[in-house]
Image (cartoon, grey):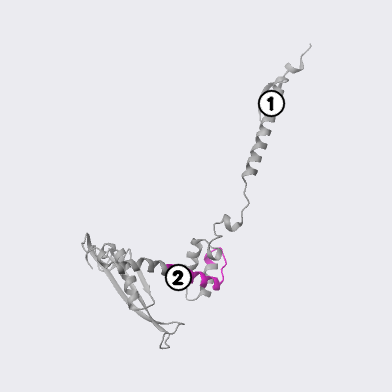
Amino acid sequence: MKVQQDRTEKTVQRGGTERTVQQGGTDRTVQQDETARTVQQDETARTVQRNREILPLDDYLQISGLPFKMSPEMMAETAFFGVHESSFASAEKMMRKYLPTRISDSLIRKVTEYVGRKTFEEDTRRACPIERNLDKIPDKPDKKGILYIMVDGATVNTRLKDEQGSSWRENKLGLVFSSTDLRKRKDGVTHDILKKEYMPCLGSAGNFKKYLLECAVRNGYGRYEQT
C-alpha cells in the first residue's frame, strides 16, 4: 500500500500523553511557529539591551549627593546610637552588634554632629518667626484640658570655655505635654505620658525661651483651657 509521506499520521508520546500529528504541512507550520518565537525573543533581547543603563553604585542607591555617602535613614540610625551611648567608641560596638554594617567611631561622631547641627538649624528656623509674632499666638481656648510645660537644668562640663575661662555650662531642658495624653496606671494614682516632646538647649536663657515657646505653641499653647 502506498502512503504519501506528507499525509502520513504518526502517534507521538509526549509528557505521558499521546498526540497525533500530521507530518508534512503540520511540520512546516510548527517550524514557522518556532522561527517566529525565535525572532520575537531576539527582538525582546535587543529591546532590553537598548533600555539597559549602566550607573555608578552611588547613583543607583541615591546617595551620590548626600554627605558621608549615607541614606537619610542610615544617618538617623547612626546619630541615634551616637547620642544614646556614653561614647562614640561604645556606639561603634553597639552598631556592629545590632546592624549589618561597620562604621568607625570617628565617622559616627561626624554624622552625629552633622544631624545635630541640621536639627538645631531647623529648630531655629521654626522658633524665630514665633518670637517675632507673639501677637499671633492663639488666645482663645478651643481645647479641653491642661497643657503642662516643665523646665529644668543641669550644669555640664564642656570642651569650650567662655569669656571668663569656664568650661561649665547649663544644659536646659523643657518638657511639654497635655492632660489628654495622660493615662492612669492600674494603681489609679500615677500616670503614663503617652505623648510628650522635649526641647533641650545648651545656651543662654533667652535662646532657650524662644525654642521652648515654639515647642509649646506647636503642642497647643494658647488653645487649652489651662496652662
Quarter of the picture containing the N terminus is top right
From the image, give the main secondary structure of the stretch colored magenta. Answer: helix
| Residue at (47, 68) in percent of width and height | 115
N-terminal label among 2 and 1: 1
Farthest bottom residue? 164
User: Could you tell me the amino acid type at mark 2?
Assistant: Arg
On the image, the x and y values in percent for residue 171 come to 38, 78
On the image, the x and y values in percent for residue 125 come to 38, 66
Q: Is residue 102 above or below residue 62?
A: below
Lateral position of residue 94 relative to residue 198, left or right: right
On the image, the x and y values in percent for residue 188 come to 25, 66
Instruction: Give the alpha-carbon distance from disc 2 to disc 1, as whole Å.
Output: 71 Å
In this rendered view, identify the residue nearer to me: 46 or 30.
46
On the image, the x and y values in percent for residue 36 come to 67, 30
Q: Which residue is mark 2?
A: 117
Q: Which residue is mark 1?
A: 30
Q: Secondary structure at mark 2?
A: helix
Q: Secondary structure at mark 1?
A: helix
| Residue at (61, 53) in percent of width and height | 55
Q: Which residues are magenta?
A: 97-119
User: Could you tell me the amino acid type at mark 1?
Assistant: Val
